[in-house]
Image (cartoon, coloured by chain):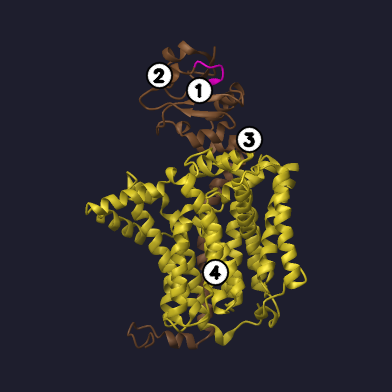
Amino acid sequence: MVAVILDIAVTLGFATTGYLCARLLLKEASWLDILSLAFPLGSGLMTWFFFLFGWIGISFDRLQVIVIWLGVNLVFAVLIWSKHNNFAIRKPAVIQRRPGLARPDFVALSILGASLIISIVLSIGRSYSIYDAIAMWAPKGYGIALERSLWGAHWGNHGFAYPLNIQFIIASFRLFSGDILPGSKITFPLFFFSMLLGIYSFWVKKRVNSFVRAISILVLATVPTLFSFSMIGYANLPMVTCLVLAILWGIEGMEERDSSRQVLSGILLGITVWTIIEGMLYVAVVIPVMFIARYVSRAGQVKPIAWIAPVVVIGGAWFVFYRLHGSAGSQAMSAASKMWQAFLQGNFRLPELRMILGYARRNIFEISTWGFIYPFGILFSILGWKKLRPGNDFVAFALLISTAATAVLSLGLFYLRSFDIPGFYYLLQRGFHRGFMSPTILLFILGIQLLTSFQIRHEDKGI
Amino acid sequence: MNLEDSKIGIPINRIIAQGPLFLYIVLSVLIVAVVIQVHLLWDKVLSPLAIRVEKIRGYSALERSAILHIGDEFVPYLNFLRDTIPPGGRVILPPHSTRHSFTNFGLAAYFLMPRELLNCGNDEVEACILRMTGHNSYIPVLSDFPPSEIASQVKRFVPFQDDLGVWVPK
């Protein structure tokens, strides 16, 4: 029972930081926004500070962790007070003008809440029981807590080749509660449901019909692959959560010409880099793509410094660490080097490329893997194709090219690994779904966004 | 150009003009999708997992990991290893191979922390074992590792059951 209380305290500790950061940046936000941002934002920022302080030699003891946490939150609190004069957050204007959430919203959110509980129970119940979670994420987190140091991340496989967000989250639970449940596995369902709430809030702000958004979020929540990944303890879904939230806040920030939301998007992109090594590549693709969306659509405004500075600061700190200590154990660097050598010899591995494309074509329509996401995403995109033209709808166009870019990158990463992994088809079977979550989710958000063009005439009474 | 002009043959604009009809169609399709997905999720993911989790709920987190990842027959041996090898001990593992998941350094670390782990190299198993003369190194039996005639030169065998056990300092 004590462990449960301590695990809840650790979770709330992270969420508090997330709330304060969101409050500092956003002039207005709904409670859905806050719930969605609190954990991914707070855990990502706090673990990054733990990492920085660890790097300069401060130990990862309970007292030091509490002092760092208090210090960071105190700074946020002072900044909030000096900027806004209060800690409460205002509802977005789009919601203030309307009567509030409608009945379908409450039904959907209640079902999501129940699903979250199921996911947490099963996630903790199965403990760390899938390979990457056992061999990498958990032992590294436990190693940090054991050695009271960042350098404890040498435990588990791949040395320091991976960013340490998830590992420090796990380490925090281990440090305070012993992680005997293991309470740290609450992290993964929380990331998934944070993403769902963020998407839901985005649809609310985009005035998607309340029945459509309520059922659509349940479509997304019940995709077998996504729900499975909310329980197994892999870092892929947390990374996808940060990336998707960053894209949505970035789009909103550009559309509304709001630099604060672009900073928020930049921080989330930085946390994406800080969560898993592929995150760096997704961010490197998403940033130019969003610039292109803005300039092709000639809508909104992008503030490059506000948006990119947080990515450079958060991601850059880890990248320097990675270059100093991590790249020797990196699978990605090894694969990239082999690919380059093969290219120089004129070997482009075209059969493997064809295999990847063929596998993708078959996999995305497997209902037991992705549910109906692809049929719907594609159908709704065809129905709303007019809005996809640049200049018609910035949001739809930005989502379209983000979807396309992340899909190409995901396929490209498999192509890269085909140069390094023997038995490549086995890798595709084992890992394709894990590498293809970002474009899948973005495509569905796009599809529902496009549906809004058909619902203007019969908008429901409330959101 | 709209969809009608493109001669795809779907009078989309006319359907859309119906307003509520289009909404009802979309909602119906989405609801059917949710029902099918919930069924699939329950059938393929939640139900099997819930049954397994229910069966192992009396075990510790570490034991649940071992049961689900390696098999429930491994748990008593894992507990034996954790009881026999002191937390400050050094554990000598076989060269990494796919024959036993416990030869994976990261995976073994999860189960045996805070004990220090070392893998013997592929070409130096004999030399590796013979080097382990210290009072702090332990060699668990995993498949045919370590060869007992070599291990017996530097260690004493503490049996578990069948051929399993751990070679401890003499």
The reply to whether the magenta stretch includes residue B136 is: yes
User: Left or right: where does residue A160 sit relative to residue A353?
Assistant: right
Residue receiving disc 4: A307
- Indicate the position of residue A305 as horizontal and vertical percent values: 54, 70
Mark closer to the observer (1, 3): 1
Both on one chain, marks 1 and 3? yes
Asked if the residue at tag 2 contacts the one at tag 1, i.e. Cβ–Cβ closer than 8 Å, the answer is: no
Q: Where is residue A420 in the image (x, y as percent from the top left)?
A: 34, 46
Q: Are marks 1 and 4 on the same chain?
A: no
Residue at the disc numbered 3: B59
Which badge, 2 or 3, comes first in the chain's sequence?
3
Which residue lies under the disc numbered 2? B127
Colour representing chain B: brown
| Shade of chain A as shown in the rendered figure | yellow
Q: Mark 2 lies on which chain?
A: B
Label 2 in the same subunit as label 3: yes
Query: Disc 1 marks which residue?
Result: B140
Within 10 Å of disc 4 (Cα), the crowding (few <14, some 14-19, many 20+) is many
Q: What element carries label 4?
A: helix
**Dot 4 amino acid type:** Trp
Q: Is mark 2 on a helix, strand or loop?
A: helix
State the count of labels: 4
Protein chain holding label 3: B
Q: Nearer the viewer, mark 1 or mark 4?
A: 4
Q: Nearer the viewer, residue B15 or A161?
A: A161
